[in-house]
């Protein structure tokens, strides 16, 4: 048994059903997320596009968070799931620094590390993770990577997939179909100019209000 995730970016619509279900299933407090949907806009008007990507713990085959944890609070199960123990955690944040995917946070209530744990309590009774169940477009797959008959294995054999930061040597088991550079590599996304702010609204043609450009004077500019 070797559990992993696959996200089909072609099907993800950015509805956040997965992140909402994760919070509900695992009592995740406000302000932190175990699963979240990344939104990246690329291109230049009018040729623009928006990409969505589900992001979470990669349940790495070679997890640096497990190696660095001084109390074995982060550990890897025999089925490949990277799990955590709140009782053993001392809140040292070493795992946060070791994780190259920013997938671990400190629970504001318990002050201990927390992250996606593959809904292990559901897996153990034969159920799929909550995010998989609620996804309306079947964009999230979870299953046994060692079983060639599983849906995730069949999809991996059929589709070209990518992972985040393979150069880190963590052997992540969160795979993406049509993962874009903008989604997989944070620095690859185009950035707005530093001077651009939401409040920087361009003036209307004709000079804008305050200059008489509206022609009516009704706004106080005439």
Image: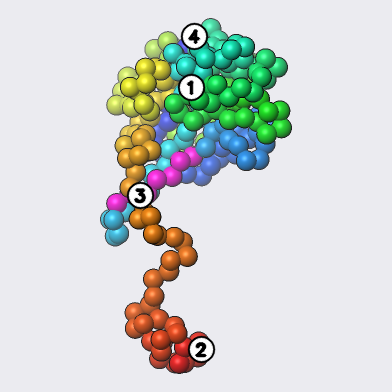
Q: Which residue is mark 2?
A: 220
Residue identifier under label 4:
1
Instruction: Write down the region rendered in magenta.
Output: 37-43
Answer with left or right where residue 164 lies relative to residue 219. Answer: left
The residue carrying pointer 1 sits among few (fewer than 14), some (14 to 19) or many (20 or more) residues within 10 Å by Cα, namely some
Q: Give the numbered dot on residue 161.
A: none
In the displayed structure, 43 sits above or below 135; it is below
Q: Are marks 3 and 2 in contact (CB under 8 Å)?
A: no
As helix, strand or loop, the secondary structure at mark 3 comes to loop
Above-or-below relation of 167 to 202: above
**Cα distance, mark 3 to mark 1?**
27 Å
Residue receiving disc 3? 191
The quarter holding residue 204 reads bottom left
First in sequence, mark 1 or 2: give its number: 1
Q: Are marks 4 and 2 in contact (CB under 8 Å)?
A: no
Of helix, strand and loop, which one carries label 2?
loop
Q: CA distance from mark 3 to mark 2?
A: 36 Å
The reply to whether the C-beta atoms of the residues labelled 3 and 1 are less than 8 Å apart is: no
Find the distance from the CA under tag 1 to the CA under tag 2. Answer: 58 Å
Helix, strand or loop under label 4: loop
């Amino acid at each position: 048994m070797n559990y992993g995730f696959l996200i089909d970016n072609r099907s993800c619509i950015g509805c956040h059903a997965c992140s909402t279900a994760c919070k509900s299933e695992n009592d995740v407090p406000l302000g932190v997320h175990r699963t979240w949907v990344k939104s990246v806009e690329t291109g230049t008007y009018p040729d623009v596009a928006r990409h969505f990507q589900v992001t979470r713990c990669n349940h790495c085959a070679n997890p640096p968070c497990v190696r660095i944890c001084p109390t074995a609070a982060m550990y890897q199960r025999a089925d490949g799931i990277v799990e955590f123990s709140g009782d053993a955690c001392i809140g040292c944040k070493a795992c946060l620094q070791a994780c190259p995917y920013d997938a671990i946070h400190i629970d504001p209530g318990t002050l201990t590390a927390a992250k996606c744990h593959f809904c292990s309590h559901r897996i153990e009774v034969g159920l799929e993770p909550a995010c998989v169940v609620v996804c309306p477009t079947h964009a999230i797959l979870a299953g046994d990577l060692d079983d060639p008959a599983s849906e995730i294995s069949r999809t991996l054999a059929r589709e070209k997939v990518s992972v985040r930061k393979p150069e880190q040597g963590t052997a992540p088991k969160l795979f993406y179909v049509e993962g874009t550079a903008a989604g997989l590599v944070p620095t690859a996304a185009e950035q707005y100019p530093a001077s651009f702010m939401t409040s920087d609204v361009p003036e209307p043609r004709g000079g804008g209000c305050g200059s008489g450009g509206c022609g009516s004077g009704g706004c106080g500019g005439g």
